[in-house]
Amino acid sequence: MNQQIRRLMSAMALMVFSLLVAATYLQMFAAPKLVADSRNPRPIFESWKRDRGPIIVAGNEIAMSEKEDGAQQIEYQRVYPEGRIFAPITGYAAVRLGQYTGLELTDSAELDGTSDSLWTQRIEDLLTGRQPRGGAIRLTIDPKIQQTAFDALEGRRGAVVVLDVNSGEIKALVSQPTFDPNQIVQKDAKEARKVLAALQEDPDQPLINRAIAGDRYPPGSVFKIVTTAAALKQGLVTPDQNIDAPVSIPLPGTNVKLQNYGGESCGNGHPTFKFAFADSCNTPFAKLGMDLGWDALSEQAKAFGFEKDLAIPLKVTQSVVPETNSKAQVAQSAIGQFNVQVTPLQVAMLSAAVANKGVIMKPFLIESTLNRDLVVQKTTEPKVFSKAMDAKTASQIKDMMVEVVNNGTGTSARIPGVQVAGKTGTAQSGRGSSHAWFTGFAPADAPQLAVAVVLEAKDNEYLTGGPDAGPIAAKILKAGLNEN
């Protein structure tokens, strides 16, 4: 009898042990896969009842949850008080559609309270019986700069990025046209789907964040910052050296001639390199590109951040300088044409590198994460992203960018009482039109903010960097520097 009892007890103990092992496996190892499995509806059902935390800019909630009176399934409604201004950043949390984008996607764990950093909060909620609530994220965005940039682009297609050159904080990130996320998260799911479908089919692509993603843009002459850095590094030229700058040059292996903008002369045809940069002459930079070769040009671009992975935490599309053995294509690449493609964020990083003595700080949007009581859990520490050039080269390019604004193509970006450094760009888009660029920083002697502005041309619309993008950049920098 005792032997039978012992066998029974052993069998029961083995069963209990097996259950513990299975439970441990499910909780510790299988749970993440089960939660992520699209066939598992439980996470969706749980999200319907979750009090999602806010996204905060300068003390104001730009994304928040409101309790639904008498709700049976979805207890909280997501609300975006200034939806259109911040939509490219926040994205949307469309619980009824099961779709999340922007920070609502990348930082969903913090906002819904399931992040590892909020485990103590979850324990407190469990022990005290409090209604579980998500944490919060506080952004680096300056609302004044963001609003100014948004207003300046209203009714246009384009983007603006503003960086703190010393920390990498993103002070503004605007993409136009935009959309109202409130229409996508509305209570009427059928209507929300109609709105989303219409936005997805809109030829102006309002759901695309043009500042960091999408099809990217040809940079045009703002890329001459990269070519200049490479040429100075290789010792091919100095700022005050006279260079050959004809009206046009033949492109090797083709019947095409590359010419200066509008077929104009570049000074007396033999100006200083600084003058050629300030006047944005094409021929000397095309010649420099061929002298450098693709390897040196590509290496310098990569030092600025091209072809590097970057998340802010929104994923940033890589900017590229496609490989080529053609001298003609290298010449075109050196002036930001051929197949060079950039994001406005990358262009802002060009100016930030010059402003910060050659060092690019990693751009970021989230200043800190907070718990439900808005107590800081984690703060983002600035860190170096890339060393684009040495301090001497950066100082030389800074002086050349100052000349652009003082006496060159960027005089429209002047700010009374503040020295601005900048570079204009006019980029052919291949549709009988050209986009307008301006990038720069201020104050030039003690840099704080770097900016990139791109205005996207419509078919057969010819925009230029100085007249079209320069004034917008000046307005944005004035707002950021509190210059009235």
Image (cartoon, grey):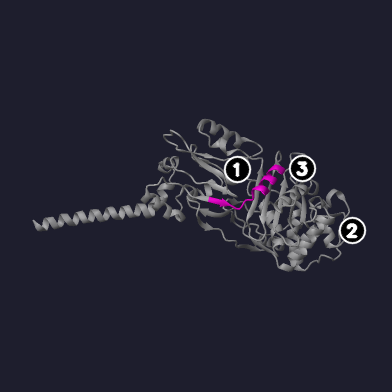
The amino acid sitting under disc 1 is: Ala
SS state under label 2: loop
The residues bearing labels 1 and 3 have C-alpha atoms spaced at a distance of 28 Å
Residue 380 spot, x, y in % from top left: 56, 58
Residue identified by numbered label 2: 269
Category of crowding for the residue at label 3, using alpha-carbon neighbours closer than 10 angstroms: few (below 14), some (14–19), many (at least 20): some
The residue under label 3 is: 433
**Residue at x 42% of width, y 42% of height:** 46
Identify the residue position indicated by label 1 in the image: 87
Q: Assess whether residue 149 is covered by the magenta stretch.
A: yes
Instruction: Give the magenta part as a residue range.
Output: 137-152
Residue 381 lies in magenta, yes or no? no
Residue 313 image offset from top left, x and y in percent = 56, 53
Residue 116 shows up from this direction: yes
Q: Are marks 1 and 2 in contact (CB under 8 Å)?
A: no
> Which circle's residue, 1 or 3, is located before the other in the chain?
1
Work out whether mark 1 precedes mark 2 in sequence or the reverse, and give the earlier one: 1
